Amino acid sequence: MHPDRGERSAGDGARPAPDPGTVEVAVRDTDDGVAVVAVAGDVDGAAAATLRAGVERAATDARAVVLDLDDVALLASAGMTLLLEITEDLRGRGVPVLLASQARTVRRPLRITGLDRVLTLHDDVASARAAAGDGADHG
């Protein structure tokens, strides 16, 4: 793990936003096989190793993964590429990835680039989890 980025563990309460240029990833496993990965901070090239490690940990025993992106402060072009790569990799292994966020910092860049039509984006974790439960993996 990069020394400037920490990982939050499940069960941590509300915490201050990570320092600019950092990302925090918290994996929350659920009983129904849908893992939720909460991401906070900047999703950019520097976040790649931390985010990938969290998603891989979540996907190990999950039938679907939901990325909770509500606390993302910056979604850089490298971060969007990373989300696409993660999604394609896990889909190839039969594990759908669904994104959840109403944050403008996430929705706007995805809409501008057209990735909102490629990635599965929901308004919140509850609707993404419901779609994963239905086996739906489309936006």
Image: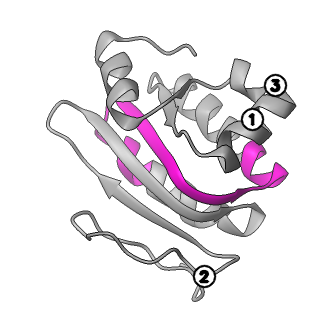
Residue at 43%, 11% in the rendered image: 136
Q: Can I make out residue 57 in this image? A: yes
Q: Are marks 2 and 3 in contact (CB under 8 Å)?
A: no
Q: Quadrant of residue 23?
A: bottom right
Secondary element at tag 3? loop
Gap in angstroms between the C-alphas marked 2 and 1: 23 Å
Answer above or below: position of 78 versus 136.
Answer: below
Location of residue 98 in the rendering, given as x and y in whole percent from the top left corner: 49, 30
Dot label at residue 110: 1
Residue at 24%, 47% in the rendered image: 29
Q: Residue furthest bottom?
A: 3
104 to the left or right of 113: left
Query: Where is mark 3, residue-wise?
Result: 114
Does residue 36 belong to the magenta stretch? no
Please state which amino acid type lies under the numbered disc 2.
Answer: Asp
Location of residue 107 in the rendering, given as x and y in whole percent from the top left corner: 68, 37
Q: Nearer the viewer, residue 87 or 18?
A: 18
Please rate how many residues cluster around mark 2, counting C-alpha atoms within 10 Å: few if below 14, some from 14 to 19, many from 20: few
- Mark 2 or 1 closer to N-term? 2
Dot label at residue 19: 2
Q: Nearer the viewer, residue 63 or 102?
A: 102
Answer above or below: position of 17 versus 69.
Answer: below
Of the 4 image quadrants, the one containing the C terminus is top right
Residue at 46%, 21% in the rendered image: 94
Q: Nearer the viewer, residue 112 or 27?
A: 112
Secondary element at tag 1? helix
